[in-house]
């Protein structure tokens, strides 16, 4: 029996999921939204807001664990904030906020 709704794709690894997330963001950024129906625009906006909250939770967990492992040392950095600035292109304020959330151990359920 077919319900008309496809099962969501489940990635096999964090690397797969990160790649798909980047691909989806590039796809959506490249869309021409002029003339798109309002219900589709609402779907895109709603999905992006949900993903944004999920990204905050993932980022806090990943940054926290990367910091715990001192992963930034491999790239000759003395701390996580500067690693974020130099390796990801985050600005100082964003990097400080990301490391602060990780330090708080914030666990957002998504």
Image: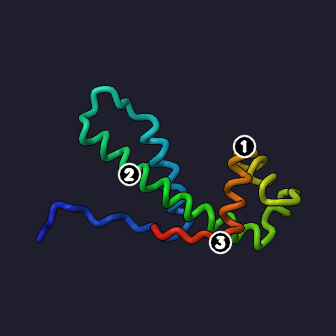
Q: CA distance from mark 3 to mark 2?
A: 25 Å
Give the vertical position of 93 relative to 19 (above or below). above
Cβ atoms at labels 1 and 3 below 8 Å apart: no
Specify the label residue 105 is tagged with.
3
Q: CA distance from mark 1 to mark 2?
A: 25 Å
Specify the label residue 42 is tagged with.
none
Q: Position of residue 55 (x, y in %)?
A: 53, 58
Give the vertical position of 11 relative to 76 (above or below). below
Q: Residues within 10 Å of mark 2 (few under 14, many from 20)?
A: few
Quarter where residue 37 is shown: top left
Q: Which is closer to the viewer, label 3 or label 2?
A: 3
Q: Position of residue 90 (x, y in %)?
A: 70, 46
Residue at coordinates 28% horizontally, 66% vertically from top-left? Answer: 7
Specify the label residue 91 is tagged with.
1
Compare marks 1 and 3 and give the one earlier in the sequence. Answer: 1
Q: Residues within 10 Å of mark 1 (few under 14, many from 20)?
A: few
Q: Is residue 31 left or right of residue 52?
A: left
Which sits in the foreground, 94 or 84?
94
Which secondary structure lies at badge 3?
loop
Residue at coordinates 49% horizontally, 58% vertically from top-left? Answer: 53
Q: Which is closer to the viewer, label 1 or label 3?
A: 3
Q: Position of residue 54 (x, y in %)?
A: 49, 61
Q: Is residue 23 left or right of residue 104?
A: left
- Find disc 2 in the rendering and name its residue: 47
Cβ atoms at labels 3 and 2 below 8 Å apart: no
Q: Residues within 10 Å of mark 3 (few under 14, many from 20)?
A: few
Cβ atoms at labels 1 and 2 below 8 Å apart: no
Q: CA distance from mark 1 to mark 3?
A: 22 Å
For the N terminus, give its image quadrant: bottom left
Compare marks 3 and 2 and give the one earlier in the sequence. Answer: 2
Compare marks 1 and 2 and give the one earlier in the sequence. Answer: 2
């Amino acid at each position: 029996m077919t319900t008309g709704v496809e099962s969501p794709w489940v990635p096999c690894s964090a690397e797969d999921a990160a790649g798909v997330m980047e691909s989806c963001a590039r796809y959506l950024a490249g869309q021409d939204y002029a003339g798109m129906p309002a219900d589709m625009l609402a779907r895109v906006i709603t999905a992006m807001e949900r993903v944004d909250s999920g990204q905050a939770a993932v980022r806090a967990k990943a940054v926290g664990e990367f910091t715990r492992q001192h992963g930034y040392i491999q790239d000759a950095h003395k701390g996580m904030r500067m690693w974020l600035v130099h390796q990801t292109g985050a600005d100082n304020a964003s990097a400080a906020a990301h490391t602060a959330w990780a330090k708080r151990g914030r666990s957002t359920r998504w």
